[in-house]
Image (cartoon, helix red, strand yellow):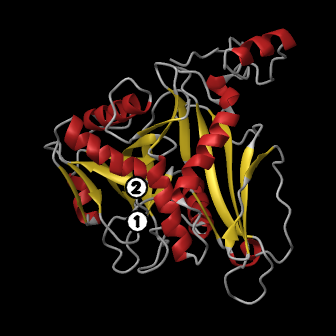
């Protein structure tokens, strides 16, 4: 079993100096001393870590790639990503489990989704096995930033790719860069879970036959005005409807919806323009195989949302964010689960999936990728 050396800092975000003797002793045991960060209060933001992975695509092939300490990117002013937003990314996390292992959750699905994104954006595919190895190497190199078990914090992992060669005509770039960086992040629900109030948006997230089903940077750029508008109006998030008929629920700017009926059936929207959330797919498996609940993926009309007992938003950052109320142009849809805590089924789903991720509950085969 891998043993973790935890920190005992008292509310400081500065790194603690370690003696040469301590580092040498730790290295001999194969243990990396944890950074002395205030894990519970680190927040959900960017904190630069020691290493990141970089690989370059040129003349029709990827190079071997390497870990580097340089966090900066240098590119031409006419780079494809700057001119035509040719970029995609993934989001995932590394955890310290109850028995001290460092793991990631279902990275094969992230690798597959990035391949799908690259193909849709006319970008070269970074091989899935190399994707998983790059993630593994970067997390291992930044082991000191993986928060200790029980802290509520995790190490966020961001693989991404972009066109880096100059492009002035509207066409794909010829050269690309694939990178992976990490950043420690604190608990998403600092101070406890508070159900969200969301609004039915007048904006469209994705067009039919567009790019809603991939994790393209351009999808998130076009959602920024909508989310800032929602925040200015006092809402936490948007509910986007299908752009064709504007009658069916799709998703928010960064999460899938999950609903629970009054007889405890778990339902999620089905649409070709919804991003296939790894968290949402995992929760549906948990609902069926661990909790014995009936599950269904189908189109969900906005009109039937008022009949559900619980609602949640599924994503990497929070796993499930409970929704207490949806406002449709002044008309409120209040869920019986209320505005004070997660609904009972949503809570069971959250506890079970996080238990699997943290090693407290046995995982389905292939779900946990052990790094160390």
Q: Separation of disc 1 and disc 2 at Cα? A: 8 Å
Compared with 202, 148 (above or below) is: above
Q: Which of 162 and 330 lies nearest the eye of the viewer?
A: 162
Q: How packed is label 2: few (under 14 Cα within 10 Å), some, or many (20 or more)?
A: many
Front-lying residue, 219 or 143 = 143
Residue 129 point in image, percent of width and height: 53, 54
Residue 335: in sight, yes or no?
Answer: no
Query: Would residue 36 be found to the left or right of residue 40 on screen?
Result: right
Residue 59 x, y percent position in the rendering: 73, 76
Q: Residue at x 52, y 20 (%)?
A: 100
Q: Residues within 10 Å of mark 1 (few under 14, many from 20)?
A: many
Which secondary structure, mark 2?
A: strand
x 64%, y 15%: residue: 6
Dot label at residue 274: 1
Q: Residue at 67%, 86% (x, y): give it.
A: 171
Q: Residue at x 66, y 63 (%)?
A: 161
> Can residue 163 be seen here?
yes
The reply to whether callout 1 and callout 2 are in contact (CB within 8 Å) is yes
Q: Position of residue 206 (x, y in %)?
A: 47, 73
Judged left or right of residue 49, residue 86 is: left
Image quarter where the C terminus lies is top right
Q: Which residue is mark 2?
A: 256
């Amino acid at each position: 079993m891998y043993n973790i050396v935890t920190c005992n800092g008292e509310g400081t975000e500065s790194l603690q100096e370690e003696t040469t003797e301590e580092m040498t002793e730790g290295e001999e045991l194969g243990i990396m001393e944890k950074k002395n960060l205030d894990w519970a209060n680190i927040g959900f933001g960017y904190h630069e870590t020691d290493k990141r992975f970089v690989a370059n695509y040129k003349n029709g092939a990827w190079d071997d790639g390497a870990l580097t300490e340089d966090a900066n990117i240098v590119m031409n002013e006419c780079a494809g990503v700057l001119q035509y937003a040719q970029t995609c990314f993934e989001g995932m996390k590394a955890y310290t489990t109850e028995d001290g292992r460092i793991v990631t959750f279902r990275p094969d699905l992230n690798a597959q989704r990035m391949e799908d994104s690259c193909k849709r954006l006319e970008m070269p595919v970074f091989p899935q096995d190399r994707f998983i190895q790059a993630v593994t190497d970067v997390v291992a190199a930044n082991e000191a930033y993986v928060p200790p078990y029980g802290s509520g914090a995790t190490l966020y992992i961001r693989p991404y790719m972009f066109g880096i060669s100059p492009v002035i005509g509207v066409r794909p770039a010829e050269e690309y860069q694939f990178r992976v960086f990490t950043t420690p992040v604190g608990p998403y629900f600092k101070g406890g879970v508070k159900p969200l109030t969301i609004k039915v948006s007048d904006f469209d997230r994705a067009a039919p036959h567009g790019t809603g089903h991939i994790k393209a940077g351009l999808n998130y750029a076009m959602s920024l005005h909508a989310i800032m508008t929602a925040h200015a109006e006092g809402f936490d998030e948007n509910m986007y409807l299908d752009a064709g008929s504007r009658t069916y629920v799709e998703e928010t700017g960064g999460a899938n919806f999950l609903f629970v009926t009054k007889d405890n059936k778990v339902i999620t929207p089905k649409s070709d323009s919804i991003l296939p959330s790894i968290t949402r797919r995992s929760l549906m498996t948990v609902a069926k195989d661990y909790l014995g609940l009936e599950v269904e993926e189908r189109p969900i009309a906005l009109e039937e949302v008022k009949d559900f007992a619980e609602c949640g938003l599924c994503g990497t950052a929070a796993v499930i964010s409970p929704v207490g109320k949806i406002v449709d142009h002044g008309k409120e849809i209040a869920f019986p689960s209320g505005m004070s805590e997660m609904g009972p089924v949503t809570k069971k789903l959250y506890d079970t999936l996080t238990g699997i991720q943290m090693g407290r509950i046995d995982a389905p085969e292939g779900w946990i990728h052990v790094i160390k």
